[in-house]
Image: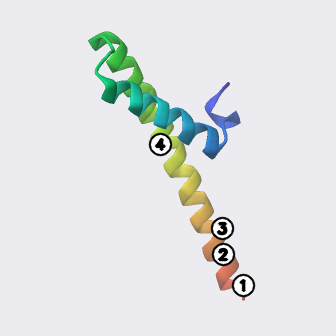
């Protein structure tokens, strides 16, 4: 699934799974780096989704 098809909720869920895996300490360095990289991508996607939602709310508030 591409990032554009990933909902905020699914991206956040996957980010939580990655964080749990990294916090467990049961992954190799190579795997930890891959997980970290994927986590950064998911974090960016979530941040953008939240920023878009914030902008929509501000636009709606201005229209009142």
Disc sitting over residue 59 in the figure: 2
Which comes sooner in the sequence, label 1 or label 3? 3
Residue 19's spot in the image, x, y percent?
40, 33
Q: Is residue 22 above or below residue 28?
A: below
Whether the residues at callouts 1 and 3 have beta carbons within 8 Å, the answer is no
The residue that appears at 72% across and 89% down in the rendered structure is 64
Q: Are marks 3 and 2 in contact (CB under 8 Å)?
A: yes
State how far apart marks 3 and 2 are (Cα).
5 Å
Quarter of the figure with the N terminus: top right
Q: Is residue 53 above or below residue 8?
A: below
Q: Which mark is residue 44?
A: 4
Label 1 packing within 10 angstroms: few (<14), some (14-19), many (20+) = few
Instruction: State which mark lies toward you, 4 or 2.
Output: 4
Circle 3 — which element? helix
Horizontal placement of 46 versus 9: left or right? left
| Mark closest to the chain's N terminus, 4 or 1 | 4
Q: Are marks 2 and 1 in contact (CB under 8 Å)?
A: yes
| Real-space Cα separation, disc 4 to disc 2, in angstroms | 22 Å
- Tag count: 4
Left or right placement of residue 24 versus residue 63 in this view: left
For disc 1, the marked residue is 63
């Amino acid at each position: 699934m591409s990032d554009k098809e990933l909902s905020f909720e699914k991206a956040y869920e996957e980010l939580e799974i990655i964080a749990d895996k990294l916090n467990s300490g049961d992954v190799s360095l190579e795997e930890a780096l891959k997980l970290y990289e994927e986590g950064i991508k998911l974090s960016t996607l979530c941040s953008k989704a939240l920023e878009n939602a914030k902008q929509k709310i501000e636009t709606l508030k201005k229209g009142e």
